[in-house]
Image (tube, rainbow, N blue to C red):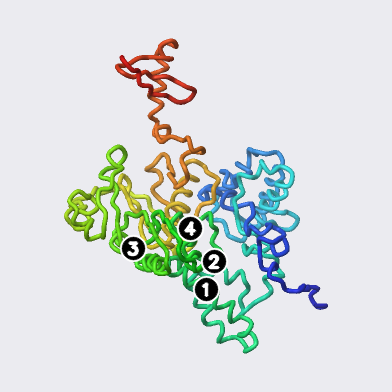
């Protein structure tokens, strides 16, 4: 239009795809996120004053850590004089307006954030410690170019619809025809029908809480598996053998019925469904159960019981059957270990957490549980772990939003054991990661070189080969 200078080319499907160069945001290349300066990493400890080094890139105002920032001292001293604030006051007690001027500029002074952003253009390694992955400013995280975001249906563009949960998106899609003209209804009828069907499949496998723009890398194994399951149901295939490995992982018990109903629906379409599971509800819903055991490792490998769930329950040799029948139970302890010291998370509001206050007793085994999407990972991983790693180990990772965490003085380190594979190659060995081989290597290191190459002990000979240890049986000794 002549008034704004903004024009919109012919609308095509590729315009609304961030996987297409035509529709992707030019600033972030369709990722929705960019590496950018993070104010939290510039001021990691708000209890310090500016003179004590609250501004981490600058350090103490009287011992600069980088000569290129020397002019900042004059600029901030001038601002302190004009705005009447002290450099010895904790950062958290300085007026927000003054903080913004220091960080984002005033007059001819660019501000610390802009200075660091300019520094990234020719010396990224110097400032990367003050960066974190944030939403792209150009597309505000929607990953599409602005032309795509100007096209709206029912006052919502495609990015806003993608930000809805499965439940919200399904409700919006079902109510949309009431707001369309007759011509628009004819155009959208088949499209909406297909969208509603696919959203319903996702809801029926217990994924109603997920948003459509959720990154696949953030999904748990169970969630990814149930998404694939929903797509298979939508395909309408018959005569297929489906093998599922613990589809209930990450799923709350209250959603189990919907998952089981989906598996039965897949069976009723003329397919065979084999499920590897520990979940009681899933086992009892099966047409046929096979119990493998009776123990683990060398004590397993046998078919202990098979038949209907009732037949497995009546098999006295099946540990699974004994628990299913109630013959064996896991009793609740009468007494639990009491704590006197706590780590307290104050006002956590990362992702879907709503100003949560939580205390974790120190010296206890603590379980954080709840429905999928309830905020467990946001609280424990994104907030508690990353905040603790930042304070204790000076990690530069961005932590979840909260006012503060108290009680960290009671611990000296924090370790995360996540769901990532423990090894980089298929040859990785659990014994390596529990440190067992360290003792064996130390033992070999104490032997003479000649003996270490073939040291007989009883009926076995230990031989070193590179990093590993091979156990070879010596016949006739």
Furthest-right residue in view?
2
What distance separates the C-alpha of mark 1 from that of mark 3? 24 Å
Instruction: Where is residue 442? Give x, y as percent.
Output: 40, 20
The local crowd at label 2, few if under 14, some if 14 to 19, many if 20 or more residues have their Cα within 10 Å, is some
- Give the mark nearer the N terminus: 1 vs 3: 1
Q: Residue at x 45, y 65 (%)?
A: 207
Specify the quadrant of the image occupied by residue 411.
top left
**Nearest the eye: 68 or 256:** 256
| The N terminus: image quadrant | bottom right
The numbered disc on residue 92 is: none
- Secondary structure, mark 3, is helix
The local crowd at label 1, few if under 14, some if 14 to 19, many if 20 or more residues have their Cα within 10 Å, is many
**Mark 1 or 4, closer to the camera:** 4
* Count of number-bearing discs: 4
- Give the mark nearer the N terminus: 1 vs 2: 1
The local crowd at label 4, few if under 14, some if 14 to 19, many if 20 or more residues have their Cα within 10 Å, is some
Query: Badge 1 is on which residue?
Result: 169
Q: Residue at x 49, y 41 (%)?
A: 393
The numbered disc on residue 253 is: 3
What distance separates the C-alpha of mark 3 from that of mark 4? 18 Å
Instruction: Determine whether label 1 and label 2 are within 8 Å by CB.
Output: yes
365 lies left or right of 418 = left
190 lies left or right of 104 = left
Query: Badge 4 is on which residue?
Result: 224
Instruction: Where is residue 242? Give x, y as percent.
Output: 43, 58
Instruction: Determine whether label 2 and label 4 are within 8 Å by CB.
Output: no
Query: Badge 2 is on which residue?
Result: 212
């Amino acid at each position: 239009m002549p008034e704004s200078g903004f024009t919109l080319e012919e609308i095509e499907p590729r315009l609304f795809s961030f996987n297409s160069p035509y529709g992707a945001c030019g600033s972030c290349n369709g990722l929705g996120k960019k590496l950018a300066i993070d104010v939290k990493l510039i001021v990691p400890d708000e209890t310090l004053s500016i003179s004590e080094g609250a501004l981490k890139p600058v350090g103490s105002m009287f011992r600069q850590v980088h000569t290129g920032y020397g002019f900042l001292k004059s600029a901030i001293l001038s601002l302190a004089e004009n705005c009447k604030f002290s450099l010895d006051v904790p950062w958290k007690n300085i007026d927000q307006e003054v903080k913004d001027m220091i960080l984002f500029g005033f007059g001819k002074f660019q501000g610390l954030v802009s200075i660091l952003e300019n520094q990234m253009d020719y010396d990224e390694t110097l400032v990367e410690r003050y960066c974190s992955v944030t939403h792209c400013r150009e597309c505000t995280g929607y990953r599409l170019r602005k032309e795509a975001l100007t096209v709206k249906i029912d006052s919502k563009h495609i990015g806003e619809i993608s930000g809805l949960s499965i439940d919200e998106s399904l409700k919006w899609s079902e109510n949309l025809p009431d707001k369309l003209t007759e011509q628009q209804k004819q155009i959208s009828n088949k499209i909406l029908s297909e969208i509603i069907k696919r959203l319903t499949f996702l809801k029926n496998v217990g994924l109603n809480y997920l948003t459509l723009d959720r990154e696949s890398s953030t999904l748990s194994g169970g969630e990814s598996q149930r998404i694939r399951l929903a797509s298979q149901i939508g395909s309408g295939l018959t005569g297929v053998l489906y093998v599922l490995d613990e589809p209930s992982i990450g799923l709350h018990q209250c959603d189990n019925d919907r998952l089981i109903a989906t598996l039965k629906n897949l069976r009723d379409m003329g397919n065979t469904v084999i499920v590897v599971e520990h979940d009681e509800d899933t086992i009892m819903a099966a047409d046929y159960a096979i119990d493998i055991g009776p123990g683990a490792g060398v004590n397993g490998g046998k078919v202990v019981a098979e038949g209907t769930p009732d037949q497995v329950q009546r098999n006295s040799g099946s540990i699974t059957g004994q628990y299913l029948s109630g013959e064996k139970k896991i009793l609740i302890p009468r007494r639990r270990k009491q704590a006197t010291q706590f780590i307290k998370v104050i006002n956590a509001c990362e992702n879907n957490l709503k100003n949560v206050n939580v205390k974790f007793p120190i010296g206890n085994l603590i379980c954080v549980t709840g429905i999928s999407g309830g905020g467990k990972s946001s609280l424990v991983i994104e907030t508690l772990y990353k905040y603790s790693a930042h304070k204790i180990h000076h990690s530069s990772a961005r932590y979840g939003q909260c006012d503060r965490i108290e009680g960290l003085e009671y611990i000296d380190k924090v370790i995360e054991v996540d769901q990532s594979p423990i090894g980089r190659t298929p040859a990785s060995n659990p014994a390596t990661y529990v440190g067992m081989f360290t003792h064996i290597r130390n033992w070999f290191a104490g032997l003479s070189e000649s003996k270490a190459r073939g040291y007989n002990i009883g009926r076995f000979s230990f031989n070193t080969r590179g990093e590993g240890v091979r156990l070879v049986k010596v016949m006739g000794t």
